[in-house]
Amino acid sequence: MIYILSPYNLDVNTTARNRILSFYSALSKNGLPVKILNPPLLERDTEARSKGLLKYDGEQGDIISFELDESLSERIISKLIGSGNNRMASALLGFLYLLINGCDFYYPVNSLREYFTSNSLRPRDVLIASGFPYSLFKVAAELARAKNCKLILDYRDPWTYSYKPLDSKVWISRIKNCLQRNTEDKCLSVANKAFCDSEMVKALFPSQFRHKIGVILNGANLHVIEPRRIVGHYPVFRIVYLGTLYNDQIIDLSFFRSLSQLLRSKQIEPEKFDVLFVGSRSNTMLPDIIDDFGLKEFITVTPRLSLPEAIEIAYTAAAFLHLKYGDRTEIDSSKQLDYLALQKPILLPISDHGNAAKSIKEHNAGYVCESENECYEMLCSLWEKHQKGESFIIPRSKEFLYSISREAEAEKLVEVVRGLV
C-alpha cells in the first residue's frame, strides 16, 4: 500500500491540496493501491466549513481522515497557533516546541502514529510525506525506520537547506535552521527519495543528499481549465492575480504606482478597468496600499475561492499579474503554470531575475519589466490593445498544455514509486 500523508484536511483550495490530489490521481490511474491520510476538519477551519466539503475524484475510502486524539497541551498549542489571534503566545509556544522537538508543531502527530499502530506497515509499503510542516517528515521517517518501509519526502516549501521562508525575518530563519538542521539530515538519510519544486531549490541541497533529490514542479491545474472557454476580449479590461499574496511581494510598489499613473493619464473610468486579487484577502497590507494609491474603485480583493470559481474569473482576464517574492529567485509558483495554461499575457512588473522571469521569457508569455517606467509603458500598451478590441489569447498546443500540467509532473512520482515496490 502507498500512503500519502497530508499535513491537514484537504477541504480548502490550496496549492498543497491540488498537488497531493494530483499524486493520488496519478498513482491510482496507474493501478497502484494508494490512500491519503489526513487529519479531520477542525472547528477552527471556518473557511472550509463555510464552503462545504470539496469533492474528491477517487474511490470511496481512499481518503481517510484518521481519528484525532489531542492531549490538553496539544489542544492549547494548536488553538493558539491555528487561530493566530495571540501572536506573541503563538510564537513563544511554537519556539518552545521547536527547541524541545527539533521541528515545527504538527498537531495530529500522535494520532498519526496511533493510526499505524492499528494499521501495520510492511516493508513493501511506501510513505509519501508532503510538507510543510516538517514535523510530518520527522514522524514519517520514524515510522519508515521502525517498520523498514519505503519513504518519499515531498518538499512544498523550504526547510533548512533552502531560501528564507516568505514573510520571515532573516535572524528568525537562521535560529530555526540551527535548531532543525539535524532533524532534516536524519529525515533525508532515511528517505529513499525526496522531491522539491524547482531545479534552483534542488541545487541548494548539500552534495551528500543531492542524488536523492528530484524535481516535481507545481504544474497547471489542467483538469479544471477548459481552453475553449477562455475569453479573448472581455468588455472590461481585467488584470487578475490568483492565490495567496505574501507581504514580501508588495514591498515593491512599482505596479501600484504604474497603475495609478495609467488610470490618471488615460482618464480611465472604474467600470472599464478592474484588477482582481483572487484569494488574497488574508493579506493585511494590501487594503492600506489600495487606499494610499486611491485605487479602491479599481481593485477587488476576494477571499479564497474554490478552484473552479477562481478559474471561472480567470477566463475573463486580459492579463495575469505575478509579483516577485522579495529578493528570492528560486520560487517556482503554481500560479505561473496556471497562467500559462490560461493563455493570456503574464505581467511581472519588476523582474525577479529568477524562475518567474525565466518562464515568461522562455515561453514568450508576457512582459518582464526592469523598471517602473517599463511597467507603466507595458500597461499603456495593453490598454491600447484592449481599446482596439484585439484578442489577448496566446495560443498553446494540447501537447504543450499537458507538458506543464500537474498530471504530467505527477508521473515522475509514479516512476519512482514503481521502482520501490
Image (tube, grey):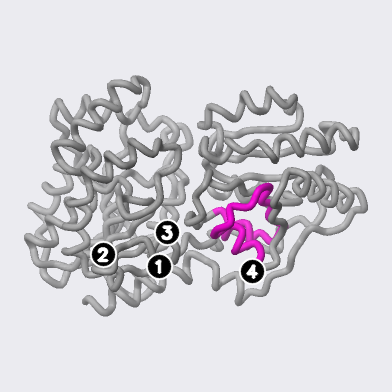
Membership of 326 in magenta stretch: no
Q: Please state the horizontal and vertical placement of residue 328, each as a whole percent of the image.
A: 49, 50
- Label 4 neighbourhood size at 10 Å, few (<14), some (14-19), many (20+)? few
Question: Which amino acid, mark 1?
Answer: Val
Q: Identify the residue at horizontal 32%, vertical 21% (top origin).
A: 88
Residue 61 visible (yes or no): no
- Figure quadrant of the C terminus: bottom left
Residue receiving disc 4: 362
Q: Residue at x 15, y 40 (%)?
A: 101
Q: Residue at x 79, y 50 (%)?
A: 378
Residue carrying label 3: 57
Quadrant position of residue 57 = bottom left
Amino acid under disc 4 = Glu
Image coordinates for residue 159, horizontal then vertical, percent: 32, 50
Q: Nearer the viewer, residue 177 or 138?
A: 177
Question: Gap between marks 3 and 2, in whole Å?
Answer: 23 Å
The residues colored magenta run: 335-361
Up-down: is 299 above or below 180?
Answer: above
Between disc 2 and disc 1, whose residue precedes? 2
Q: Residues within 10 Å of mark 3 (few under 14, many from 20)?
A: few
Q: Which residue is depicted at the point 23% across and 27% down?
A: 93
The kind of secondary structure element at disc 2 is strand
Q: Is residue 118 above or below residue 276?
A: below
Q: Which residue is mark 2?
A: 152
Q: Are marks 4 and 3 in contact (CB under 8 Å)?
A: no
Q: Amino acid at mark 3?
A: Asp
Residue 105: percent from left, percent from top: 24, 38
Identify the disc placed on residue 215: 1
**Circles 3 and 2 in contact, beta carbons < 8 Å:** no
Of residues 175 and 392, which is closer to you in this image?
A: 175
* First along the sequence among labels 4 and 2: 2
